[in-house]
Image (cartoon, rainbow, N blue to C red):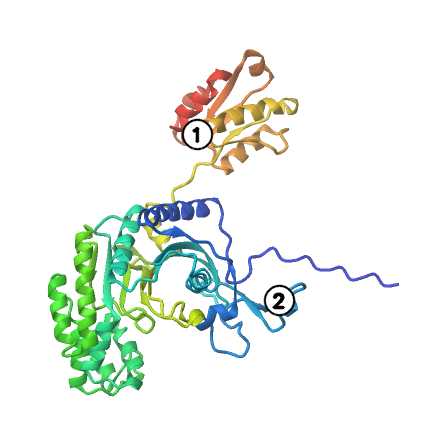
Amino acid sequence: MAKDKKQPRPKAETPKGFRDYFGQDVTERRDMLDRIAQVYHRHGFDPLETSAVETVEALGKFLPDVDRPNAGVFAWQEEAVPGGGTAGDWLALRYDLTAPLARVAAQYRNDLPSPYRRFAMGPVWRNEKPGPGRFRQFYQCDADTVGSASVAADAEICGMLADALEAVGIDRGDYLVRINNRKVLNGVLEAAQVREDQAEDVLRQIDKFDKVGREGVLALLTTGRLDDSGARIDGVGLSEAQAGPVLAFLEAKGADNAATLDNLSTAVGGSAIGAEGVDELRQIAAMLAAMGVAEDRAVIDPAVVRGLGYYTGPVFEAELTFEILDEKGRKRQFGSVAGGGRYDGLVERFTGQKVPATGVSIGVDRLLAALRAKGLAGAEVAGPVVVTVMDRDRMSDYQSMAADLRAAGIRAEVYLGNPKNFGNQLKYADKRGAPVAIIQGGDEAERGVVQVKDLILGAKIAAEASVEEWKSQPAQTEVARADLVAEVRRIIG
């Protein structure tokens, strides 16, 4: 009788597009998000945690319009799960933090205050092709105000964003919150007599202003241009006269907010919606000034064209202005780390009633990378004090030492591996990044003392000191057991 074929062992590997986060990464991200949360809390925003799973129906327009609604998300059909819901229902891992907010605002509309201010932080999942720096699971950090049509809510978000960046360590002068308004652009399109079927193409060309400049955008709006490879890119087909207001909009940035707003007023011509957008920007600028947010922190800037196809009013982004070296050693500006704006229809899909909302999302991984580039994160995190084990029968004594250290607020652990080889215990402490090792053998126990080994100083001495200095063991001190906590505290500062 043939034996059953042995099943192959599973591969110990992270699924494609996902990654594992270890101690220091988790600690740095948590510390950064805690500082942001404190700022949001001071501004009156409440934390919200929603389920990682939403119905595909609730995700709505955030999903591609396909027959099988799992393109772009990780989804499954309820009838395929034992004890699941109604046949035909689909569930999915949340795609972002905005769709769950829409569902919550509708579901609890009679219980929540209006306006409702909330912030949310957590992982989201996208079933998309991964690439360099592009993962299928990543963190988002959002803050939104739902239920207020006042541009005071937009100004508050912008000021709060500036405060959050400073709270995590970004200095003034190293960031700028830039603000624009979709209504202004609508007015520009109206003044330029852009047809409805041309509007999306015009928006795409406007977005290329930073890359191709004035003449490049003019060509793209009119007859087209050749790209760097020599390939022909068709233009939108506007006349040069029509392109005029669009270019005036893109070049409206003045020496200060007042000059920029005057230039935008000219760009929108006689458009009523455009004038409304300029007035909203004027109000935001005045409120930011009243909040103490000067123009070196937040500024009106027509060059912000991100998300103009989605946002309905003010739109803003936070840009880091300091330079870093790229992988080829070239200097470049770090760029955007957050973006947001005003959007309508958030809750309307559920209730049929328009509910205005505005919000911002911080790119968690990107902001953390910026902090590391500035030397504000990424430093080695000290591990726990390691209490070594010289005698298995005295494990209670060692646990008591660790407990005393913890009670004093010092991170500590007892070595729980095989204590036979003491060298391996010190190797373990080194791998843990321990600043101190505690040693007590039978002789020390009888005398009521412990050996406290400064591992950081010891490593420095081993690398730099003379043989005589090394033999003198200045990195290891004998103290009374009662003085253990005080000596460890002295060493670690």
Is residue 264 among what the camera can see? yes
Q: Amino acid at mark 1?
A: Ala
- Looking at the image, residue 340 lies above or below residue 30: below
Q: Position of residue 258 (x, y in %)?
A: 11, 63
Q: Position of residue 412 (x, y in %)?
A: 50, 31
Q: Which residue is mark 2?
A: 85
Q: CA distance from mark 1 to mark 2?
A: 64 Å
Task: Please identify, in this view, whether the residue under mark 1 or under mark 2 is nearer the observer.
Answer: 2
Above/below status of 189 relative to 99: below
Q: Nearer the viewer, residue 167 or 131?
A: 167
Question: At 46% across and 64% down in the image, what residue appears?
Answer: 103
Task: Please identify the quarter of the rendering in which residue 458 is found.
Answer: top left
Q: Is residue 458 left or right of residue 4?
A: left
- In the rendered view, tell whether residue 438 sits above or below residue 120: above
Q: Quarter of the image containing the C terminus?
A: top left
Can residue 480 be seen? no
Spot occupied by residue 329 in the image (x, y as percentages of width and height):
31, 57
Q: Which residue is mark 1?
A: 462
Residue at the front extreme, as displayed: 110
Quadrant location of residue 108? Answer: bottom left
- The percent coordinates of residue 375 (x first, y second) are 32, 46
| Amino acid type at image mark 2 | Gly
| Among the two numbered marks 1 and 2 on one chain, the one whose residue lies closer to the N terminus | 2
Tell me: 51 left or right of 197. right
Mark 1 crowdedness (10 Å alpha carbons): few <14, some 14-19, many ≥20: few
Quarter location, residue 161: bottom left
Q: Give the camera-side residue of 454 and 183.
A: 183
Q: Secondary structure at mark 1?
A: helix
